[in-house]
Amino acid sequence: MYPITFIYRVNNDKDPYRKRGSEIGDIQLKATSETFSPKMVVDFVAGLLGGAAGVLVGHPFDTVKVHLQTDDPRNPKYKGTFHCFRTIVQRDKFIGLYRGISSPMGGIGLVNAIVFGVYGNVQRLSNDPNSLTSHFFAGSIAGVAQGFVCAPMELAKTRLQLSTQVDSGIKFTGPIHCLKYIVKTEGIRGAFKGLTATILRDIPGFASYFVSFEYLMRQVETPGVAYTLMAGGCAGMSSWLACYPIDVVKTHMQADALGANAKYNGFIDCAMKGFRNEGPQYFFRGLNSTLIRAFPMNAACFFVVSWVLDICNAKGGMDSVMHSDQPLTLVNLDNKSQADLEATAPTVEEVVRKIITDNAMSHQYVSTPKDVVHSHYTSSTINIPKESKARLASDCNLK
Ligand SMILES: NC(=[NH2+])NCCC[C@H](N)C(=O)O
């Protein structure tokens, strides 16, 4: 069962004396997301839409990257990132930046649905849902889960991008064609080449992704649009920083010839050979462009995910208050314990009524049940009797 969590503060004013005997009107409520939404599916949908938004924002960066990577070094067309960007827009119009968007759109949409769906559900079901440890754990599990879709998808993408160098110059029409060819020549196992490396990359990748987002969102009481975008962007960058060396090895594994002609004998062998040939730089090639793309992409992604959860959860919050026997968690932003609060502040019922009437539900992605003291707030879990919820509901004319 999902705990219900509302973040509130008794008084805006930082002056501790002003809080004494606060009126109900001083309560500001902020409902948090992970609490409601018994519909597990909301997380998947939010992830899908967030992934699509991320691709929409991130794809032009990818296009520029691929153009730069394939530019002729002896007779370069482009003088740099920005010049490349401008040239493409001038030559092919804006749409030029969006060529080839359909397969990442579908693929990343699907992967993101799995990532956010698994992450959200695992995190909610864990013992202490709001601890950073749960976010770490849920992110890791999500990393494993998405690997099974992500690995074949990235295998096809890598081989399409390098199709002149590998697969004896076969011209694939798209990712599906490429995967069909791999299955035909190497069997089903061939399609999962690089699976271990993908999972090894995405466990730290998604653990750091969600932990850093959560951590950043906890640093302010009410994160606004700009702050949420910033937190999402930083989460994307920290995720890549945490796993980049593994990503380099994964790319080499997937670009390697299939079957008997393979150069590498597995992940370790590939990493060792790369290191011996090039030294430590091997593990960081292409990091810059990855980080540049990661910021806007993940800013958009997290923003849309938060926004979708917000919309879907607003109503669920009311339902939960009225119809469930679940404990209600009140997070006091004034950093007082509940016992302390009860002596000086409105009663829990008043708070709940305020919650219902204000219906002030805004997604925060942050909250902490149980009596835990944080730098910014204290939270406590309270059981609201069923009858008093019902009374509150009827008091407020809610069905
Ligand atoms: N290593 C990872 N997969 N990190 C998560 C970032 C995912 C995100 N879709 C991106 O491509 O930036």
Image (cartoon, rainbow, N blue to C red):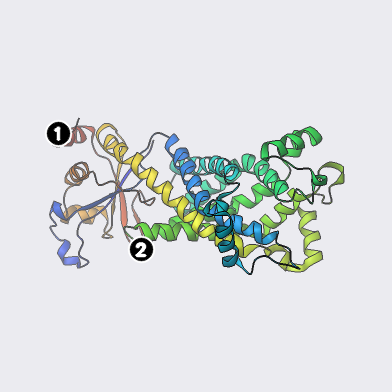
Q: Quadrant of the N terminus?
A: top left
* Callout count: 2
Mark earlier in primary sequence (1, 2): 2
Mark 1: amino acid: Asn
111 relative to 381 in the view: left or right = right
Compared with residue 30, is residue 334 higher up or lower down, i.e. above or below?
A: below
Q: Residue at x 42, y 52 (%)?
A: 303
Residue 323: x, y in percent? 27, 31
The residue carrying mark 1 is 397
Q: Residue furthest front?
A: 91
Front: mark 1 or 2:
1
Q: Which residue corresponds to the image point at 43% horizontal and 61% vertical from the top-left? A: 230
Whether label 2 lies within 8 Å of ligand 1 gets the answer: no
Residue 184 vertical position relative to residue 211 in the rendered view, above or below: above
The image quadrant where one finds the C terminus is top left
* Residue that mark 2 sits on: 375
Amino acid type, mark 2:
Ser
- Whether residue 170 sits left or right of residue 15 in the image: it is right
Residue 394 seen from this side = yes
Query: Residue 178: x and y, percent?
Result: 72, 39
